[in-house]
Amino acid sequence: MQFEDIEVKPGRTLRLYYQKAFNGVHERLGAKEHAYAILFLHGVGGCALLWKKQMEFFNDRGYDVYAPDLYGHGDSLPLGEPKQHDFMFIELRQDVLALFDWIDPTACVIVSHSYGAAFSNYLCKERESQIIKMVEISGGHPRPLTTHCCSIYRLPVCCFNLCGDYLRRGFMVLAFSQPPPSDAAPAYNLTPAVFRYIMRGQVWACNVEYHASIKQTTLLIIGSGDSFVSLSEVREMEAVSLNVFNVCFVHVVIFRVQAIPGAKLVVFHGVGHMVMLEVPEQLNATILDFIRPVVIDEPRSQAGQIHTRIYTKLL
């Protein structure tokens, strides 16, 4: 996997991991149906390496794949002492937008996890014509982001520094429905101070109307054992389905979901918050079957919308 450090603005650099397909054509669809870029966005505490199995899987099938370390995570570290302002949502979303413009894909699918879903939703509005579909894993409800005045994240930084190891251990216990796999280290990869700043910086006045205006066909995924995001929160994303997608596994249940038009919700039973690490093969197959029908060289019906051929497939 290749990487490049991208300066999103003076003094602020993000690490971007990527791998381009050898010919840009999906090996299983033939020369007329081209692959496209897939951008993976992690959530709080994670890093690009969370998506290693997904990036390898989709690149092997002819897709260009990209995954950044968000600011303060992985190898995207602040040059000096971190400050609260640097981790406000409005700053982080500009980072993601700058990275997307650096990639500049003709057609892109965004796959996001947890807090990363907020950046995914933002990109779908800001770069509507370039994004075809969206997959959100444990993305939560369509309400405004806010931090309560009595939140524990209001405690001084020194308190978080003292209990940093306990924070990591607690996360690793709650994030998985079973003992963490051997490759679970990237699931929590940031300092206590940065963790506090990011949690306090989750302020964004989006709402149901904002999400309802997203045009991209969307697949929502959650594990039934998720300790951080409830099924009821995700099921708020309900609306009349515009582009139908059907998938069936023995261990998966599908619901009609709210707020984002054209969305479907897939629940993986017996799986926790870190779906990409607990059941990577099932997740990869579900995403592939969702995104594969798109044919990017057909005419656009309107901005951000592409005529699609939908294949109903029983796996």
Image (tube, grey):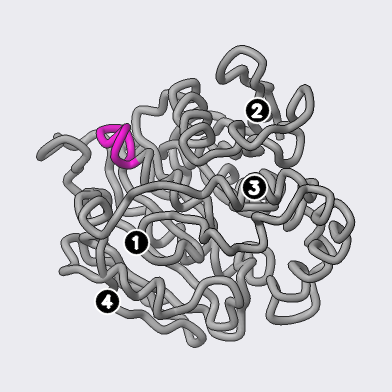
Residue 240 falls in image quadrant = bottom left
* Spatial CA span between label 3 and label 1: 31 Å
Which residue is the site of mark 2?
A: 14
In the shown orientation, is residue 37 left or right of residue 14? left
Q: In this view, does 264 lie above or below 156?
A: below
Tell me which segment is drawn in magenta. 124-131
Q: Is residue 120 magenta?
A: no
Q: Residues within 10 Å of mark 1 (few under 14, many from 20)?
A: many
Mark yes or no: residue 19 visible. Answer: no
Please name the amino acid that badge 2 sits on: Leu
Residue appearing at x 68%, y 29% in the figure? 15
Q: How crowded is mark 3: few (under 14 residues within 10 Å), some or many (20 or more)?
A: some
Q: Where is residue 139 in the image (x, y as percent from the top left)?
A: 46, 61
Which of discs 2 and 4 lies nearer the camera? The answer is: 2
Name the N-terminal-most of marks 3 and 1: 3
Q: How crowded is mark 4: few (under 14 residues within 10 Å), some or many (20 or more)?
A: some
The one of 119 and 312 positioned closer to us in this rendering: 119
Name the N-terminal-most of marks 4 and 3: 3
Which residue is the site of mark 4?
A: 256
Which residue is the site of mark 3?
A: 56
Mark yes or no: residue 191 visible. Answer: yes
Which residue is the site of mark 1?
A: 142
Circle 4 sits in a helix, a strand or a loop, which is it? Answer: strand
Please name the amino acid that badge 1 sits on: Pro
Name the N-terminal-most of marks 2 and 4: 2
Name the N-terminal-most of marks 1 and 4: 1
Name the N-terminal-most of marks 1 and 2: 2
